[in-house]
Amino acid sequence: MSIPSRRHLPLLAGVVALAVWPLVFSSAYDLRVFTLAGIYAILVIGYQFIFGHAGALALTQGAFFGLGAYITGLLGAKLGWSALATLPLSIMGPMLLAVIIAAPVLRLETHYFALATLGIAQILLLVAIRWESVTGGANGLPGIPALTFLDVAVPGGLPMVLFVWSVVALAGLFAWQAMRGLYGRAFHVMRSNELLAASIGIDSARLRAVAFLLSAGFAGVAGALYAHTIRVVSPEVLEFHVMVACLSMAVIGGRTGVAGAILGAVVLVHLPEWFRGLQDYYLIAYGVALLAMIIVAPEGLAGLLGQAAGTTPSRRAGRIAGAVAPATGESRFRAEAKAAAPLLSVQAIGKRFGGIQALRDVSFDVRSGEIVGLIGPNGSGKTTLINIATGLYAADAGRILFDGRSLTGMRPAAIARLGIARTFQAVHLVEEMLAVDNVAVAVAARRPLRLGRALTRPLRDRAMQSARAEALAIMDRLGIVEAAWHRAGGLPHGTKRQLEIARALALSPQLVFLDEPAAGLNASEQRQLAGQLKSLAEGGLTLLVVEHNMPFLMSIADRMVCLDEGKRIAEGTPSEIRANPAVLGAYFGAASVTPGSRQ
Ligand code: ADP
Ligand code: MG
């Protein structure tokens, strides 16, 4: 990648504009506004972790900001501490608060999460107003010393602008480095589809917690700098308008990109200046602008500019495809003979949804290297069984053993990491992500995803390259490598289904559940898929295949299990199943031998 490519033009232009701005608009007032814009940029870069990357509508960012400001204010004004001591404490204070509230709050569904985090902000505001002896109550705390850092005084004006914007640069670098590789893509998978994330072993709860902590820490930095800039802290810093401003900046600038955060902050901080003529109508104009952005440019200003500059994800197909490595995943596809001990043992599973008994006392085994077909009419409980085995649902009765170990109570991501992969009846892909990265994320998720590792990667991201190379090798084996550098959402249906299988294989699983893999495939695609599944099983992989397409399934299955109304009514070889009267009665029914109906 050549460095000053077209992709970087908007960035370069932005940097130049930002550098020139304070020199041109150099009145004390302008400089202060510009300092505030930088402070808000830090706040928003932090907020993007939880709101953008993790996709959770947290309303605590203003509270974290206020807390950071109060910590610096109190320790600076009352005890005369310098920024060297107060800045770290202003970071740690909000992070500690985030830790305390993370456990109960992060589990909540989005809207409850928003409400709960809003409540926390209100409590802090009350404390700041009521605890007069310490916080100065509604009047606030005056007399915060100017910033001194490493014994160098940073008075207001241009020095403060430079200091704050240096911190913006550092914060931006941190966020960019954390999120540009597979770690950021794991966040992308999580926010677009949590089920899917869990199915490839991504621990969403952990990612969200990390994002929440980072948000808090960045907000603390912003709050501290704010206190040093304004030199007074009052309950105003905890009021809701800080949160509203931060949220608006993230929406208007863009939810995930550093450039968007900076753009949003600069534009919104200056907006009141630019639209001063509107006076009372300002708020209405503001609301209209916000709505317009949400509708017209859901990816914010940064997204719009990116489109204008022709920024598309890089398509460096040839280079990496040339370096395709053999899939190391192969090693865990155990090639040993079909062992006697079952790999998967389903034991007396029962599951009820309200009035529907979806599964009733279902038992069967799957041995290593086997292809077992699971059939039954629509609604007979096939998908439910997969959902229980992969930890999405808890069974009411019975248990499932994998390699002799009970899966009961395990979370989906942990089950995936044991080596149990799945595909979904309705295709689940991250549509706007490159096909190859849909698979590469699953390769990466085999190891626990760590922020520290993401931050310490070299510029040339070898982890990403090797994950992509492995993804390409898997895709190549399934005959879909040409699709690698296209967005997943634009691929034909058959390729999408194959891509799901590729992603499942990227986990290096021992067992894969395939939920109607042939659905929607044409005859030649079905033949191809059947061949591929057979060769995977010959390589030692174990498959449980749910399918309505009998010719397809019977051509690959070693054994079949038939469910009807949640009960196991038959088990045997394909020819036994074909001749079984119970199966014929329940499943093949009156009219058709290959029922094509799907849910
Ligand atoms: P199959 O995959 O064999 O077509 P499912 O396992 O999807 O069947 O469904 C079995 C039964 O359980 C159906 O009656 C379905 O409506 C019901 N069911 C499945 N999942 C849920 C759920 N999450 N909530 C309520 N009912 C469900
Ligand atoms: Mg189903």
Image: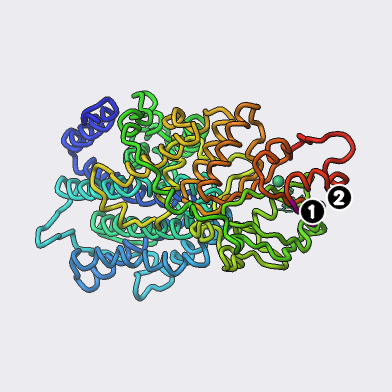
Secondary structure beneath disc 1?
strand
Q: Which quadrant is home to the C terminus?
A: top right
- Does residue 53 appear anywhere in the picture? no
Of 124 and 113, which appears nearest the observer?
A: 113
Of 315 and 74, which appears nearest the observer?
A: 315
Whether the magenta-drawn stretch holds residue 150 is answered as no
* Left or right: residue 157 compared with residue 379: left
Disc tally is 2
Asked whether the beta carbons under mark 1 and mark 2 sit within 8 Å of each other, the answer is: yes
Residue that extends furthest to the right in the rendered view of this protein: 590
Residue highlighted by disc 2 = 582
* Left or right: residue 459 compared with residue 204: left
Whether the magenta-drawn stretch holds residue 566 is answered as yes
Of 309 and 356, which appears nearest the observer?
A: 356
Residue that extends furthest to the front in the rendered view of this protein: 337
* Left or right: residue 562 compared with residue 516: right
Residue at (37%, 44%) from the top-left corner?
A: 467
Classify mark 1: residues with Cα within 10 Å, few (<14), some (14-19) or many (20+). Answer: some
- Distance in Å between CA atoms under marks 1 and 2: 7 Å
- Give the x, y percent position of residue 462: 28, 45
- The mark nearer the N terminus, 1 or 2, is 1
Q: Amino acid at mark 2?
A: Ala
Residue at (15%, 60%) from the top-left corner?
A: 148
- Give the x, y percent position of residue 585: 88, 45
The stretch of residues the image draws in magenta is 563-572
Residue 147 picture quarter? bottom left
Disc number for residue 145: none
